[in-house]
Amino acid sequence: MSNSFGKIFTITTYGESHGLGIGVIIDGCPAGVTIDEEAIRIDMQRRKPGQSKITTQRKEEDEVEILSGVFEGETTGTPIALSIRNKDQKSKDYSHIKDTYRPSHADFTYDAKYGVRDYRGGGRSSARETAARVAAGAIAKSLLSSLNIDVRAYVSKVGKIGLEKGHHQLNLSKAEENIVRCPDEQMAERMISHIDEVRKSRDTVGGIVSCVIKGVPAGLGEPVFDKLHAVLGQAMLSINAVKGFEYGSGFDGVEMYGSEHNDIIEKQGEKVSTKTNYSGGIQGGISNGEDIYFNVAFKPVATIMNDQESIDKEGNKVTVSGKGRHDPCVVPRAVPIVEAMAAITIADFILQKKTNRI
Amino acid sequence: MSNSFGKIFTITTYGESHGLGIGVIIDGCPAGVTIDEEAIRIDMQRRKPGQSKITTQRKEEDEVEILSGVFEGETTGTPIALSIRNKDQKSKDYSHIKDTYRPSHADFTYDAKYGVRDYRGGGRSSARETAARVAAGAIAKSLLSSLNIDVRAYVSKVGKIGLEKGHHQLNLSKAEENIVRCPDEQMAERMISHIDEVRKSRDTVGGIVSCVIKGVPAGLGEPVFDKLHAVLGQAMLSINAVKGFEYGSGFDGVEMYGSEHNDIIEKQGEKVSTKTNYSGGIQGGISNGEDIYFNVAFKPVATIMNDQESIDKEGNKVTVSGKGRHDPCVVPRAVPIVEAMAAITIADFILQKKTNRI
Amino acid sequence: MSNSFGKIFTITTYGESHGLGIGVIIDGCPAGVTIDEEAIRIDMQRRKPGQSKITTQRKEEDEVEILSGVFEGETTGTPIALSIRNKDQKSKDYSHIKDTYRPSHADFTYDAKYGVRDYRGGGRSSARETAARVAAGAIAKSLLSSLNIDVRAYVSKVGKIGLEKGHHQLNLSKAEENIVRCPDEQMAERMISHIDEVRKSRDTVGGIVSCVIKGVPAGLGEPVFDKLHAVLGQAMLSINAVKGFEYGSGFDGVEMYGSEHNDIIEKQGEKVSTKTNYSGGIQGGISNGEDIYFNVAFKPVATIMNDQESIDKEGNKVTVSGKGRHDPCVVPRAVPIVEAMAAITIADFILQKKTNRI
Amino acid sequence: MSNSFGKIFTITTYGESHGLGIGVIIDGCPAGVTIDEEAIRIDMQRRKPGQSKITTQRKEEDEVEILSGVFEGETTGTPIALSIRNKDQKSKDYSHIKDTYRPSHADFTYDAKYGVRDYRGGGRSSARETAARVAAGAIAKSLLSSLNIDVRAYVSKVGKIGLEKGHHQLNLSKAEENIVRCPDEQMAERMISHIDEVRKSRDTVGGIVSCVIKGVPAGLGEPVFDKLHAVLGQAMLSINAVKGFEYGSGFDGVEMYGSEHNDIIEKQGEKVSTKTNYSGGIQGGISNGEDIYFNVAFKPVATIMNDQESIDKEGNKVTVSGKGRHDPCVVPRAVPIVEAMAAITIADFILQKKTNRI
């Protein structure tokens, strides 16, 4: 029950880090969406390992094969199956952890749940699964771009180094010009240096990815449990290593008064808009046409290169040595994943909205 | 599609603020759970309006009628329908907002979505809906208590006044001894004074509710999209006025190094546990047996008693005057709501886990 | 997971035969549907017990209270809760069966499943639950009638007495003119006499309800698992006492050749239609604009007034004597139930279709 | 929303007749099921085209690749992806039908629904999709066989040639000894001759597949909408070319009296059983431990080799000539498909039952 997301535009992913491959079925994508295979390729490149000195050195081409649901460049309304073969899996790197529970990994919890696990590279718990999400997200983005909706994420914090400026003070398109994906050039350099230091000290560090969605029409989101931000929240919290989610004023809004926080509504020409946007583009769980924006907190990656104490399956003390190829900081590669999950969520709500009026 | 929550232990709520009544169907509750009607009544009292000087003065008894699914004090496995009649709805209080869009309310967004709305008291968008959740939560708590799982929420921040201590440094049972539901007596007094001032200035203020779940067995939560914290996050973000969710180290974890953040695993007697608990009791989306803890950020209530500018349906400028009966700060009454949604989420995952092994 | 039906237009029912009441939540009904309370009342009358000499003599007014989701006579898009109180439940009639397993009833199977059951009047397994479906069906019919779709069921067979004519040779509106709901007056009289004889002999007999849906646009139904007829089939088979479902040529189609069975397509004016309609208005699981028609087979009611051998919970032999008030033949009262489930199914597919194209 | 089936043990299929490949993701299969790859291969052989003179001559090896969810021969609880590549697709065979609506095919209805379709070999509407179901069914059978549940289907009728004997009078294991899959050798020969004649006359003919499930424990099936037979019915009706479904006494039960039809319950040793089994092993939608049996009616295949009149997209009259490679009668190859869908349905209900008691 756990590997699907969405109500109408639905994705179901499969695959383990070191199995034959991973992939996704998108069910419920409407017919008539033009698919840009190059756009899929670009997003896969943005997520793929080995793309820069501050990411893991595992090499995966992450080529996406479209097996169904697209005919002559257009979606047909039938399920879209996207397949990605694993190529550079070095399973022998993991034989040493077969019976070991690594700290803050999912080794122990998978065993507690299933009584068995594919231990190679973390198996299903590996962030490799997110490659399938990015592929599906690229399809969702195609749908959104036909409606002039734009989803854009960027790194706003690495460790203690965080942007002071809000999204409306930044030129977000500059985020892709550097390897850490921060739209402020100077901050980007500081972040990159910091990650590099952390990597050299064989440690890891956390960060924040921020995201802005522009062009969302008013009226998306379902009342009560499937509020737009509640489903966005689930989507983001489902990404590996995420510890928190806030939208609009977020945790800072706690300290505000109602008289400050309320967004005054006005009408400019035909468009209803708000003077401020502490609501983050969502009121009562439903979009109001303003920019939707949110922050996603990532913890430091659990795999570090220094030795750690732990236990094995039988409870014996063991030493875990960092092996394999891993990221010192996950946020640069998380940017396209956040975008993908945001795009999938919005696409789903667009379809849901079509059923609101007879 | 929007008014249900859960995969196996499923709740579906209905009702508007000023309609005939509200309620909930719980489908999928297993047979054999002993129902304590007094426990339901107590939780309803904790959420109900008019309970103290710092809450809205609307008077609702919020008596819950169990229409089905319980026979001779025990659940039968069939749907449990819980009905709550509205009694003190004063709809005339709201005729003045029939065509008005109140700032940071859902008036405009419901219209944008459905083209029509029950404007009385916010209709479906009112937090009155959460009374149904609390009733359902009391059933979930009955199920959990038979498994020795304990869910406890409390107020940890009001405006800028926040607890410094973590949950393990507090005696949480003291939270119910004061009207703001903060377990630290001195802080509670400061919070109460602050809310009272805010109320007198005809304004509102935000706050944080924290929650701890003890006794959760290892192995709950589903990999990938339905990670335990992702579904908890959706559950919390679906509560009215919530702007953010974080669990374990949360947003603070961003600034940490992996070598600090990793929770070292050890075995004490038969029990596998961790030295620290930055993971918040969840690793890879699955519980590890440690305490689950999280924070939920609430914005200041949108209804303030001071005048505000806004527009009506036609786009004309109007002045919105605060009328009706409202809370100056939502967090004291939100405590049982947070508990209810947490209990429902955990109950669902307990049932899901039963299907993990053949 | 078992008490809901539908993907977008979703119904969830609750209630036991002799509890406080039964009811239904309709979630996903679009806004803007005009609700005709009189139409609900009429359908409830058609299903209610005690309506004629050939039905059970239990007296229930079956008044439906609309608790939410309808404002000023129109749906608002929020959940519609419909409540029906039980009034004439005579629970003492059932104390004698508390520990008895009645033949071909669900007493034993509920115990096997849940380990406990509300034995009064069959509890949840009673056909009383279908009153909630009829109420929900009346809302679905309101939606369909705004689109000029007409759902009409009738009795086509009682025991061995069956209509020879197909639906296109009958004036279906005449079905409501007699108490057995057969559109052929002479056959109706024979059926009524037969049921009356069966009743006098303290026995029961089976029958067939046929149904025709006119005005369904081409393009409804989802490929593969949710074919229009597959979901209709589930809907019908979910009605108490149903043993079979066939649509279009049905079981007779087995004996035909492809060259006979194929429906030749032609275009008349703007409308694509078929010369014959062995397909029953559905091809590849999707409506083609022709009449949809199907048959539903009902077994003889299990409760008979004559004594029967059986066992009790402990396996002791017991004699089951027919008590209580029951139908000698279920089909006359099943007509509005079949219509309700058909209307609900079509309403759901209409909403699903809205999401097929971007 | 249409390409998934099941609540816990869930399958989602993808793929078109002449695309790159087809496949299925099984989500929710419990950990610990031993997978027998040879059993998958055998079931695929039973369904595959070109297996005998009475089936289509398309050649597909239908090799199944297990991409995920199985580790060291055992399921891990994570999604099982099964991939089948198309090899012998001869798309040029279909260019002539690009704009043609074939009689009793889904060409027109897919266009009405989606506005676009992959016309090659029927695209998604082709029965080729059922290969993915058979692969998933083999996994479900592995699960069932560990619980000693046996699913066995056979051909009981071809055109007018039907078995007189019920399943308990037949040795079902003999069904696989002949190419038509009828357990009565003499009838099998008559059926084979008949299909061969039909093939030579360039026509097609219908048939019935019967199925028996032995060893199902009492207590499976969910009350109300997801009655065991209702979901089995949907499963069967979702198979291409199916027109009807009946279980137990089925349509014949209509003509019986309650006093005949009721299955008297008795206890033999520890086991509760019934003297007769008109209920088909299901009472109130829940299994009672007796054999579950049902019939599935298949229409004659729509593709015939003789010329037929039809229209094209623009409404012009055209002649459809039979080309491509097709089955004169679908039932011999439908046997493993019926078994697969039955096994998947039962597997799902076994998991659902685990959640019925706390």
Image (cartoon, coloured by chain):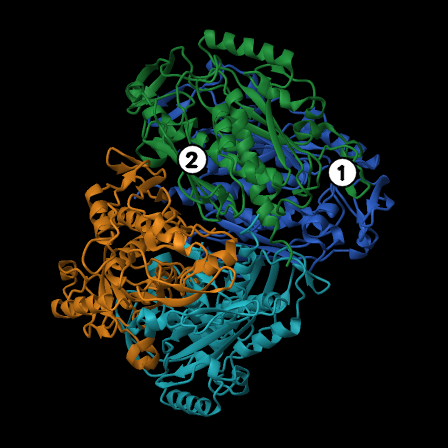
Chain colours: A green, B blue, C cyan, D orange
Residue D139 in the image: state x and y as whole percent. Answer: 28, 46
Residue depicted at x 23% and y 47%: D146
Q: Is residue B70 visible?
A: no
Residue C72 in the image: state x and y as whole percent. Answer: 73, 63
Q: Which mark is residue B328?
A: 1
Residue depicted at x 54% and y 87%: C177
Please state if B278 lies on the left or on the right of D95 as rendered. Answer: right
Please state if B187 lies on the left or on the right of C187 as rendered. Answer: right
Residue B163 in the image: state x and y as whole percent. Answer: 64, 24
Vertical side of C173 occupied by D265: above or below: above
In what element is the residue under mark 2? Answer: loop
Decide: few, some or many residues near mark 1? Use Cα within 10 Å; few <14, some 14-19, many ≥20: many
Give the chain letter at badge 1.
B
Q: Which mark is residue B223?
A: 2
To the question of a shared chain for discs 2 and 1, the answer is yes
Mark in the foreground, 2 or 1: 2
Give the chain letter at badge 2.
B
Vertical side of D224 occupied by A17: above or below: above
Vertical side of A347 occupied by C211: above or below: below
Number of numbered discs overlaid on the protein picture: 2
- Foreground pick, A108 / C4: C4
Q: Amino acid at mark 1?
A: Pro
- Foreground pick, C354 / B354: C354
**Do the residues under discs 2 and 1 have CB atoms within 8 angstroms?**
no
Q: Amino acid at mark 2?
A: Pro
In what element is the residue under mark 1? Answer: loop
Please state if C144 lies on the left or on the right of B128 as rendered. Answer: left
Q: Is residue B32 visible?
A: yes
Q: Which image quadrant is residue C158 in?
A: bottom left
Among the two numbered marks 2 and 1 on one chain, the one whose residue lies closer to the N terminus: 2
